[in-house]
Image: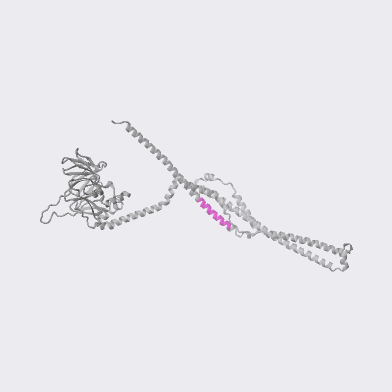
Amino acid sequence: MHSVLKPLIRAALTYLLSVLAIAAVLIGGKYVIEGVKGAYSAREQLALLVGVQDEVERYRAERVATLAQGLTGAGQLPLAAIDERIGLVTRELASTASEEAGELEALLQAGPQGYAERLAARYKTRLARAVLLQELGYLQQVRAHLFALQSRAAASAELSRLLGQHRAVYARLLQKQREVSQLGWVDAQRFERPWARSPKLDRLAAEVSSLSADNARAAAAYRTQLLALQRMQSVTALAAFTVDHRQLDQAVQPLRDRLADARAAVSRNWFARLAEPLKRALPLAAGILLLALAGKAGIKALFYFALAPLVTRGAAVRLDPARPAGPAGQGGTPPQAVTLLSASAVSQTVCLASEEELLVLPSYLQSAPVGAARATRWLIAGRPWASLTSGMALLTCVQTRHPGDGVVLSASDDGLSEIALLRIPAGRSLVIRPRALVGVAADRRGPIDIRWQWRLASLHAWLTLQLRYFVIRGPLTLAVQGRRGVRMQAAQASHAIRQTATLGFSTDVAYSTVRSEPFLPYLRGQAPLLYDRFGGAGVYLYDETPGGGRQGRISRGLEGITDALLKLVGY
């Protein structure tokens, strides 16, 4: 009964999932766009601030060099010249003392184009003020030092004058004292007693007393001036000018903080964190890719122009060369050739004789007559190792009751698979890829002749990685599957086919390879290096759609490696 709700529910779920998918894309796209915009804005701001800092640092170096050069020898200038320079620096400081605008105000006033210039000018002004303040401070030190030196010179001259004055007074005092010492005994006794002095002796005593007082005052003045001069001797020498970089660092510290914040903003942005390592790794990755492409092209050129011609000139592989019909004069008849019983189709009917049984892969057994005997055959009797290594294990064995009853074979899990039936008569054998073998109809009274054959001495085998061949001998009937069909052609060395298309060939053919032409499709991976070529009187089988479109023996990653290893051992 047809359900009306089922398509409605399916449509509702489809639309709901579509809406959810669209919403997820919109939300994810929003985050991606915001991340890209944030990363671009942060990196643009960082680049702008880095440019401003570089310009400010260059300006700082120039101002520091100019300042150091201008203050060299400032201590040798006269005091008037120092005072003139102090006045000039003070006026420059007054001209740069205007109120500074903030960064946002500077951006609004100057616009995005002039923001960097305004910001750089702002910090240049700060540096100029810091440099001028250091210059003013040093000039004031020079002035104080020069003033101290001039005061010390005046004090030294005054000390010399007081010393001369003291010496003159002291000399007159000594002269008067000599006059006193030259007095007679009576006058000396009267000189010692003021009441007994004569007017002449009173004048002499008064002069001695006055000169003694003057001498004491002169000596005191000299000693006082000497102490003052000694204190002035403690004035240290003027040190050379050195730039205080801490003050300059403080002037530009807001710019450094802003630059650190910009770097942090870039590092916090998820898109920038992803893009930065990718940006650093891209040149190396591109170089590695170019080397890999060049190496791959070189290896392919070596195989194409050196190894392939060498191999194609080698002897063909012959697993079972055709024997003559019989000894001379005995009139023997050659065995029949391998024949195609039924062209490939989606399903095939295998008719079994009374003495035959069918060994088939369970997934390819579509139907069998009622009453037909079925059993599981773990391995092909008499050939356990070949059966196990070829994949012909865990088979379904079918035996019909009546001769001519048909068993239908068809792929149950592959809509592109088609099956062909081949008859291998007695005395003939066929090389077959085990992956193409679906079933075997043979006489149950004897073992099926299956074996592996190695060809290690053939250049064809090594370059095509086909060292081992799976050979099955008649009489029996094979069911072979291929994608979109299996074709069989006579081996006349007139056609070359892709190796991936080859499913098998009779052992009496001469199997060889031919180089693909031209070189460019092989270089681009659109064609294999070698094509299979079959000569002689036998037949070969090939797949209509080989390998679902896969190329060559080493095609894609692990799948290609697996295919190459399997081909190496005959699969």
Quadrant location of the N terminus in the rendered image = top left
The quadrant holding residue 360 is top left
Q: Give the dominant element type of the magenta stretch: helix, strand or loop.
A: helix
Residue 280, horizontal then vertical, whole percent: 43, 51
Q: How many marks?
A: 0
Residue 158 in the figure: left or right of residue 349:
right
Is 457 located above or below residue 489 in the figure? below
> Within the magenta stretch, is there residue 211?
no
Q: Nearer the viewer, residue 507 or 353?
A: 353
Give the residues in magenta: 51-68
Which residue is drawn at the image coordinates 81% and 67% (left, top)?
A: 175
**Going by the image, does 327 lie left or right of 562?**
left
Left of 248 or right of it: where is 226?
right
* Location of residue 179 by image quarter: bottom right
- Of 51 and 270, nearer the camera is 270
68, above or below 101, in the image: below
Residue 258 % position (x, y): 52, 48
Q: Residue at x 79, y 62 (%)?
A: 215
On the image, which quarter does residue 299 sit in? Answer: bottom left
Residue 289 seen in this snapshot = yes
111 or 457, which is in the foreground?
Answer: 457
Residue 381 location (% of width, % of height): 21, 47
Colour option used: one colour
> Can the viewer see residue 84 in this picture?
no
In the displayed structure, 18 sits above or below 290; it is: above
Residue 451 in the image: state x and y as whole percent.
22, 51
